[in-house]
Amino acid sequence: MKKEQKVLGIDIGGTNIVFGFVNKSGKISNKTSLITADYDAFEPLAKDIFTLVNQQLLKNSSTGIISIGVGAPNGNFYSGNIEFAPNLPWGDKVPVREILNNLFQIPVLITNDANAAAYGEKVFGAAKNMKDFGLITLGTGLGSGIFTNGNLLHGHNGFGGEFGHIIVVENGRFCGCGKHGCLETYVSATGIKITALELLATTNENSSLRKERDLTGKIIQQHALEGDCLALKAFEITAEYLGKALANYVTIFDPEAIFLFGGLSLAGDLIFEPTKKYMEGNLMTIFKNKVKLLPSALEQNNAAIVGAAALAWDLL
Amino acid sequence: MKKEQKVLGIDIGGTNIVFGFVNKSGKISNKTSLITADYDAFEPLAKDIFTLVNQQLLKNSSTGIISIGVGAPNGNFYSGNIEFAPNLPWGDKVPVREILNNLFQIPVLITNDANAAAYGEKVFGAAKNMKDFGLITLGTGLGSGIFTNGNLLHGHNGFGGEFGHIIVVENGRFCGCGKHGCLETYVSATGIKITALELLATTNENSSLRKERDLTGKIIQQHALEGDCLALKAFEITAEYLGKALANYVTIFDPEAIFLFGGLSLAGDLIFEPTKKYMEGNLMTIFKNKVKLLPSALEQNNAAIVGAAALAWDLL
């Protein structure tokens, strides 16, 4: 019997490592999860993945895997390493590609999470026929994956697309990267939380948010949906930063579309409408009403694995 | 006798149209100049170019031209038109590619001036072995040509790389594009002139600039070189805007180098040193001390023709 060729997609995160087989249509199978904190080095983790994958392949004799795609924070496409990832406990430079390649003896490709999501959108999602687009991930931070002329923007050292770290406010909020005023300190789950706290601290406006013990992006979203003015204002402010930054993005890249993915993007109109308003309001005439601002078409739960696999499929 | 194959490079500007033959090494010959204002439509201009070029080819039987590269303000690579160029008197959409192709019956390629200069740098200049770099033209305005992964960033509609129109100051200086606070209103010959005038108006500092009847970028540069504090301050302020914008550029593109071309870039250390200081001071650790900030290696006088020709050579 001829085996169906699949790719192993691996999503490495600060909390979980999730992997699974992904076929050429983007369908995922044998999804498996491990806990990041259980491993104090990458080698034993890689060995466990190798063992588990081989067990699954033995049970599933119609499947063969031909390559591996890895999405990881600070995953570097060129070096094959995870480099200086603040939320992973395995050292400054983790040679992920080398270790996995030695075990599996098949090609291994790695990139960062936002790039992997952009690959997912390109290969399996709503950007299938697009050559020029950007995908913005709105999570704890803000990541971006950028395609120009059909190619992912890796940059000279593999660090291209750090759109979350453009400076948008002179002497603004302190960022984990060491700078001040980075976009992600305003536009992210962390960013909207600080914005809401600032609004609570600097006004005495009535707000149902005052009753919450711990604010999160999700909780602020719930209150905004219920019509709380202060929560709505936090979204408006967040969207203003994002929309203006996207106007600069459009001015530089002239993309066909920009996709918003994850976290805050799931707030739908709450984030899309004001973001579009501020983006369009800051564009030159030649760019106005041309760029589609869209939600990602990837299924949020599997996007990271599927995206990592898309990288491998795309480059095969 | 076998003819040497050359490309016809045409530089269309608001004052002059200059064209010449460019061989595969970037050597220019038969440079000819016409006056833009002499033509109230593009067709008669194209016919004059056709006639003059044929006369030159007749005299010069060892040369054959195989394609044409055109650099023009708002030249659109995809449509082949010059679109809405404020300083050209030939209408909103000028079908340059079609008209020249009909006359010459050889392939015609067109792009805007900054992109042409970037092509020149890539094919004949200091970016020969680079895949990821940016070239910033500092003239009356600020233009940019951006290479990622070895390809010029044209964008979806052919308007990519409008780096001069990213907004850097909220409600800042009015820009010809209709927006406020665009980078080019601060970083260009026009920008530094306004900065100097603002300094003259808002301080009573002694300055040799006060004796000048008409300030230009060049005059401010001369005074700065002679040590005038206010002129030096105008350069420092201009470089601060440019350096911070380039830090954001690096954060997005992770380039190997950024080239500065024309006008203000000819001020040498006056502009390069403070620009580098502000760029480096606003970079994340992973980008620090990696990006080369360099003067263009193209000969300023011929760069536009050579750049237009480079586009044609590169895509042949």
Image (cartoon, coloured by chain):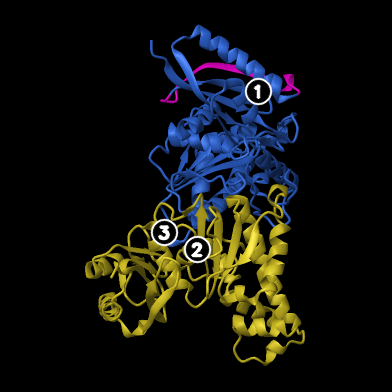
Chain colours: A yellow, B blue
Chain at numbered mark 1: B
Q: Look at the picture and state if B13 lies above or below A108.
A: above
Marker disc for residue B16: 1
| Residue B281 falls within the magenta-colored stretch | no
Q: Nearer the viewer, residue A169 or B135?
A: B135
Queried whether the magenta region covers residue B35, the answer comes back as yes
Q: Nearer the viewer, residue B178 or A21?
A: A21
Image quadrant occupied by the N terminus of chain B? top left
Looking at the picture, how far across and down is residue A17, in whole percent? 38, 79
Residue identified by numbered label 3: A314
Q: Residue furthest top?
A: B59
Q: Residue B141 is drawn in which quadrant?
A: top right
- Marks 2 and 1, Cα distance to the nearest angstrom? 44 Å
Residue A153 image point, x, y percent:
47, 54
Residue A118 - label: 2
Q: Are marks 2 and 1 in contact (CB under 8 Å)?
A: no
Q: CA distance from mark 2 to mark 3?
A: 12 Å
- Residue at image position (52%, 75%) is A300
| Amino acid, disc 3 | Asp
Amino acid beneath label 1: Asn
Q: What numbered label is drawn on residue B56? A: none
- Tell me the residue at 61%/17% (across/down): B50
Residue B212 picture location, percent across and down: 71, 31
Foreground tag (2 vs 3): 3
Along the line of sight, which residue is nearer the eye, B220 or A210? A210
In this image, A123 relative to A295: left or right? left
**Residue A241 image offset from top left, x and y in percent:** 65, 65
Q: Which residues are magenta?
A: B24-40
Label 3: element kind? helix
